[in-house]
């Protein structure tokens, strides 16, 4: 009997050691239901929860205070790099040569050496999976010629995205020497929303472990939610003494993709638990209503070289309270006709989406082709054509 008890105790101890070695707390696996009206006690300086496709904010706490973001900065770095790839200015298999400046970066890194070359793709993976400061600088210098020039692009893009409380001084978030390298939870959500439009990033950010240098150097994701939170897709963590612990965490369940930003948590575990709690709140209380776009029957055109015109409306998305997705109705409000000249995109009406008497949202119905105004000579040509046919 004593031996059995010892074996059971030994099993429990081994189990505890193994469980502890993966570094996960119960809160990181949280799937609890939080009522929409409940006051969330979030252990952080600021936070925001946003639905990705609509940009609708579902919850916020001090979301506009400028704070140091640490490595969450790299979301903008990655966005500029991905946009360079999309434009054709940069290729994933392109080789990047490492400068002395890039190799000198401290903090989290992949220990790049001056003169070493590595593909854009491996550097991208290193930045988003392992938060490599040296790779972030190397990519920036390769894209813009210098880190300073790249930072100018970062600030310009932030302004374009409406990030009103943001100023970047470097590409990686190291903040020992910066003076005003700040952003807000809302601004981080805005740039995160833009970044995840690039599906390649989500491929990288969902990886738990990978390797570079032909398998000789291992990468482990700094975002433990990727492994332990149901539906997690990414995105970027960060921590310094000034910033404390931050994260932009993305997760998708069904058709709803959420962006959760936590800034200024006291510990890594508090950051992860708070992010899980806020994501739980979103998934428990909200749903994404989606209506497909449609091409409608031809609409009459007056005074045009053609008598009708194609019209359509795009997909519509709206965040609603969970359980209300099936209660939404759609009604079309279409003009009787369009007057030539008609241009692609001219408004021909709208689709109104309602829940009962409450308007959930609306979307425009627009022309899908150009119709020129008919000329007098065109009228004469048609007239004589009819006569000749008779």
Image (cartoon, rainbow, N blue to C red):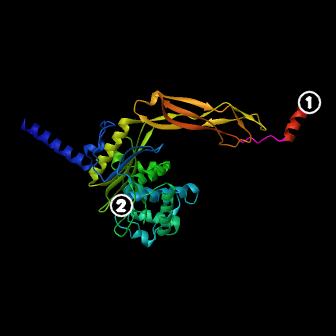
Outermost left residue: 2
Task: Please state which of residues 228 and 34 is positioned toward the viewer in this rendering.
Answer: 34
Number of marks in the rendered image: 2
Measuring from the top left, give residue 114's x and y in whole percent: 43, 71
Majority SS type along the magenta span: loop
Measuring from the top left, give residue 113's x and y in whole percent: 41, 69
User: Whole-Å distance between the Cαs marked 2 and 1?
Assistant: 79 Å
Outermost front residue: 357
Q: Does 371 lie within the magenta span?
A: yes
Looking at the picture, does residue 169 appear above or below residue 364? below
Instruction: Say left or right for 168 vs 305.
Output: left
The residue that label 1 is drawn on is 387
Q: Is residue 379 visible?
A: yes
Measuring from the top left, give residue 341's x and y in whole percent: 74, 42
Residue drawn at x 46%, y 49% is: 193
Quadrant assignment for the N terminus: top left
**SS under mark 2:** loop
The part of the chain drawn in magenta is 370-375
The residue that label 2 is drawn on is 68
**SS under mark 1:** helix
Task: Please state which of residues 217 and 140 is positioned toward the viewer in this rendering.
Answer: 140
Residue drawn at x 48%, y 54% is: 162
Measuring from the top left, give residue 259's x and y in whole percent: 41, 46
The disc label shown at residue 50, or none: none
């Amino acid at each position: 009997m004593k031996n059995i008890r010892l074996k059971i105790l030994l099993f429990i101890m081994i189990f505890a050691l193994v469980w502890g070695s993966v570094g996960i707390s119960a809160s990181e696996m949280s799937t609890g239901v939080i009522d929409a009206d409940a006051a969330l006690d979030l252990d952080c300086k600021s936070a925001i929860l946003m639905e990705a496709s609509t940009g609708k904010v579902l919850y916020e706490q001090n979301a506009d205070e400028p704070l140091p973001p640490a490595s969450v900065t790299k979301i903008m770095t990655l966005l500029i790099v991905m946009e360079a790839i999309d434009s054709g200015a940069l290729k994933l298999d392109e080789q990047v040569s490492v400068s002395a400046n890039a190799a000198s970066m401290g903090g989290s890194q992949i220990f790049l050496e001056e003169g070493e070359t590595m593909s854009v793709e491996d550097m991208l993976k290193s930045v988003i999976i392992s938060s490599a400061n040296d790779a972030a600088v190397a990519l920036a210098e390769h894209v813009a010629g210098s880190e300073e020039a790249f930072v100018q692009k970062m600030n310009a893009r932030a302004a374009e995205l409406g990030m009103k409380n943001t100023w970047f001084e470097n590409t990686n978030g190291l903040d020992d020497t910066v003076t005003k390298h700040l952003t807000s939870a809302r601004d981080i959500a805005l740039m995160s929303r833009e970044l995840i439009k690039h599906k390649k990033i989500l491929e990288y950010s969902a990886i738990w472990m990978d390797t570079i240098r032909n398998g000789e150097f291992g990468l482990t994701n700094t975002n433990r939610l990727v492994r332990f939170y149901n539906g997690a897709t990414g995105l970027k963590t960060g921590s310094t003494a000034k910033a404390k612990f931050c994260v932009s965490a993305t997760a998708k369940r069904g058709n709803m993709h959420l962006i959760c930003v936590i800034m200024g948590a006291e510990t890594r575990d508090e950051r992860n638990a708070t992010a899980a709690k806020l994501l739980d709140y979103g998934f428990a209380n909200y749903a994404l209503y989606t209506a497909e776009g449609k091409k409608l029957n031809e609409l009459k055109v007056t005074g045009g070289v053609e008598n009708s015109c194609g019209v359509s409306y795009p997909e519509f998305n709206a965040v609603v309270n969970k359980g209300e997705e099936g209660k939404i109705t759609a009604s079309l409000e279409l003009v009787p006709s369009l007057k030539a000249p008609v241009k692609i995109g001219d408004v021909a009406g709208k689709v109104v989406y309602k829940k009962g008497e409450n308007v959930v949202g609306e979307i425009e119905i627009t022309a899908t082709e150009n119709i020129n105004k008919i000329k007098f000579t065109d009228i004469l040509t048609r007239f004589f054509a009819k006569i000749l046919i008779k």
